[in-house]
Image (cartoon, helix red, strand yellow):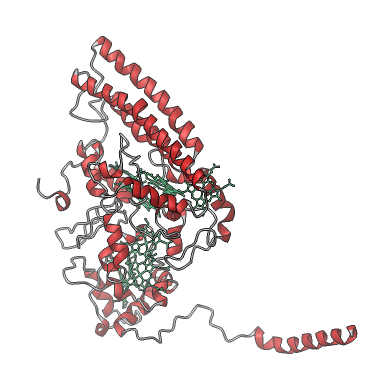
Amino acid sequence: MRQRFLSFIIGLLAVGLIGAPALAQPNYAKVKEYRIERSVPPAAQACIECHRVTTPGVFTDWARSRHANANITCLDCHLIQPGDQDIAQDHEKYYGRSDLPWGEAKYKMPIASIVTPKDCSRCHPDEATQYSKSKHANTIEIMWKLDPWLNKGMNSDNERKTGCYNCHGTVIAMDDKGRIDPDTWPNAGVGRLNLDGSKGACTSCHTRHRFSVGEARKPEACDQCHLGPDHPQIEIYEESKHGTIYHAYQDEYNFDAAGGTWTPGVDYRAPTCAACHMSGSGKEPTSHDVTQRLSWETQAPLTVRPQDFKPFPSGTDWQDERQKMKNICSACHSNAWTNDFYNGFDKAVNEYNDIYFKPAKAKLDELYEKGLLDKTRFFDERLEVEYYELWHHEGRRARMGAMMMAPDYAWWHGFYECKLRFANYMEEANHLIETGRKAYVAEDFPNATGDTTRPVKIFGDK
Ligand code: HEC
Ligand code: HEC
Ligand code: HEC
Ligand code: HEC
Ligand code: HEC
Ligand code: HEC
Ligand code: HEC
Ligand code: HEC
């Protein structure tokens, strides 16, 4: 029996060996082929064939996307739409280049450089509508309503271009030559105001041209903006148990499940940013409005409910939104666990408001009232900076650490530093009040040259 089995195996091996030389010289192409045998119009085929050579990176990303799979071509996104101003003027010349594939006048099409949420909304209307309501989409308006850096001109235009606007977005403009103003684009900030009036760049989470749902589900899609001393969400996440589990098990996570089917427990075992803030779970639908599911406004100086946030009231009810977030937790946690978390979070918010922020604000008002601090500019006196950092840096870290389960941020980077800042601030403020001495004003505050005109496209001429 054993003998017969062995000779059977040997026989199989022999057949395999005879077959081998044929396999050794397979008739395979060395480079991945892309054969267009579907109903793609010739003008769209031209884009693909020429760009495969001129910008292979763009071509390959697209070829590997769900879009390519579904026959969505370059033209579906880049074709000029009625009223579009951002026509790529120099592009026409490539159709006269016989050295380039498909470089013939008969394929010529006017194309737009910028692809906006409005362009995507032709096929993804729900995502675009939800997105347009979020604070992501409306952040330029919020920024100009609130921020002393802009309203008092305390930084330079280039500091804004290379800093603020890469995260928040630019107001895209045309220059006198009818070209896109290079100071305003390329840019992929979440609230970029497009020439067609739509807001945002879908590429801030789904980078072109993969436009992948899996990419947006990973914390890395958020961390380029949600980091640093004033909103360290990625650092907080990394420190939390959820982040620890993500790092230990991410190889087992199924990030590429179809949109709306990403399932807790099945596709991932601990949530990422998107899982808590955007993805659907159980009866909770997916949303592109990150303002949903929030019950506090922890980035504000005084923590308020999102509906009471004056520059941009959310139009939501905080209790409903909290319930939505709890529904997310409930896929993996018992109510006791979730409620205990919210208890600690609410207390942290209230303690921050009452013990640190309100007294510090009252002291600042007193100093202005007594003329000991000068109100015309901000940041040019040390106490203004101390006050700012108390709410904007450690005050946020304390609240945000408690909000997303990061003990080191809640305490060492948070309330611990609040105590130090508060004590120093009060000591200096009381000293001025007792002696009646005015604070030193830094007349040479550096590079406070930024334009303070509010963007007309958002605020009108006023
Ligand atoms: C015959 C070659 C050729 C064809 C056909 C072609 N392109 Fe291009 N395209 C180019 C080259 C070359 C560039 C410039 C790349 C660079 O700046 O180095 C370019 C640039 C672009 C840009 C960037 C333009 C900007 O101002 O930002 C876009 C978008 C674009 N092409 C889309 C398309 C689309 C959509 C089509 C089909 C309707 C198409 N191209 C057809 C050669 C071609
Ligand atoms: C799903 C929509 C979509 C499709 C399909 C699409 N693009 Fe784009 N493309 C974009 C977006 C979005 C940008 C980023 C521009 C912006 O910021 O608005 C872009 C940018 C570009 C750029 C400039 C990139 C750079 O870094 O300079 C080129 C070139 C380009 N596209 C060519 C193509 C070509 C060629 C195809 C087809 C193979 C294609 N696009 C298909 C949406 C699309
Ligand atoms: C002409 C229609 C069309 C346009 C325009 C379009 N899409 Fe799509 N998109 C589709 C289709 C169809 C699918 C589904 C493909 C599938 O299910 O296989 C898809 C899928 C997606 C997905 C899911 C990909 C995944 O990994 O599962 C994302 C994200 C996406 N699109 C983003 C965008 C963005 C951002 C834009 C604008 C820059 C855009 N789309 C423009 C038709 C379009
Ligand atoms: C690294 C990206 C990044 C940079 C650079 C940046 N911000 Fe922000 N900003 C954010 C994020 C993310 C938030 C949201 C914080 C939160 O909700 O926890 C935010 C919040 C804000 C808010 C509060 C909005 C609100 O709803 O209360 C204002 C105002 C603001 N930023 C203005 C600015 C200005 C002005 C600059 C430049 C001087 C700037 N930011 C630089 C990412 C950035
Ligand atoms: C803040 C990050 C972010 C931005 C910006 C963003 N998306 Fe998404 N998008 C996601 C996440 C996360 C998912 C995955 C939801 C899930 O788990 O099913 C997703 C999923 C999708 C899908 C798959 C179907 C679905 O709805 O689940 C489409 C299509 C899509 N996005 C289109 C867009 C369009 C169009 C825009 C611009 C208006 C956009 N996205 C902007 C994060 C983002
Ligand atoms: C376990 C779920 C969970 C995960 C994972 C998570 N968050 Fe949160 N996040 C929350 C909760 C809960 C709140 C507070 C909601 C409220 O206001 O009631 C919150 C609040 C926020 C806020 C609002 C801050 C403000 O302005 O009040 C931002 C911004 C944020 N998270 C970003 C992120 C980012 C970025 C990541 C990933 C690096 C992330 N979150 C991961 C649960 C989560
Ligand atoms: C390109 C930068 C950028 C990226 C990428 C980004 N965000 Fe944001 N996010 C911002 C800015 C700026 C704000 C502040 C908006 C405001 O309040 O004015 C913000 C605010 C938020 C808020 C608070 C909304 C509110 O109503 O207070 C949440 C929650 C949030 N982001 C979640 C996410 C998640 C989750 C991701 C990744 C899937 C992500 N963001 C990716 C820049 C970004
Ligand atoms: C996809 C499943 C999943 C979701 C959704 C989820 N968690 Fe968790 N969470 C876990 C796992 C797994 C752990 C680790 C438990 C352990 O320590 O064994 C954990 C741990 C925790 C911890 C303990 C932290 C620590 O340091 O020990 C808290 C608190 C927590 N989660 C709160 C929440 C809240 C609040 C939500 C909703 C906003 C939420 N979780 C959503 C899976 C999840």
Image side of residue 459 versus residue 98, left or right: left
Q: Is residue 181 above or below residue 75?
A: above
User: Residue 273, image x and y in percent?
Assistant: 44, 52
Which residue occupies 34% across, 81% down?
45
Total marks drawn?
0
Which residue occupies 42% across, 24% down?
419
The answer to which image quadrant residue 1 occupies is bottom right
User: Residue 77, image x and y in percent?
Assistant: 29, 71
Q: Is residue 251 above or below residue 400?
A: below
The answer to which image quadrant residue 180 occupies is bottom left
Image side of residue 189 versus residue 275, left or right: left
Which residue occupies 38% across, 47% down?
322
Q: Quadrant of the C terminus?
A: top left
Q: Is residue 224 visible?
A: no
In the foreground, 117 or 91:
117
In the foreground, 174 or 221:
221
In the foreground, 443 or 128:
128
The answer to which image quadrant residue 49 occupies is bottom left
**Quadrant of ligand 2 in image:** bottom left
Extreme residue toward the left, this view: 461
Extreme residue toward the top, this view: 435
Which residue occupies 51% across, 44% down?
337
Image side of residue 253 versus residue 70, left or right: right
User: Residue 192, image x and y in percent?
Assistant: 26, 55
Q: Is residue 96 visible?
A: yes
Extreme residue toward the front, this view: 335
User: Residue 364, image x and y in percent?
Assistant: 26, 24
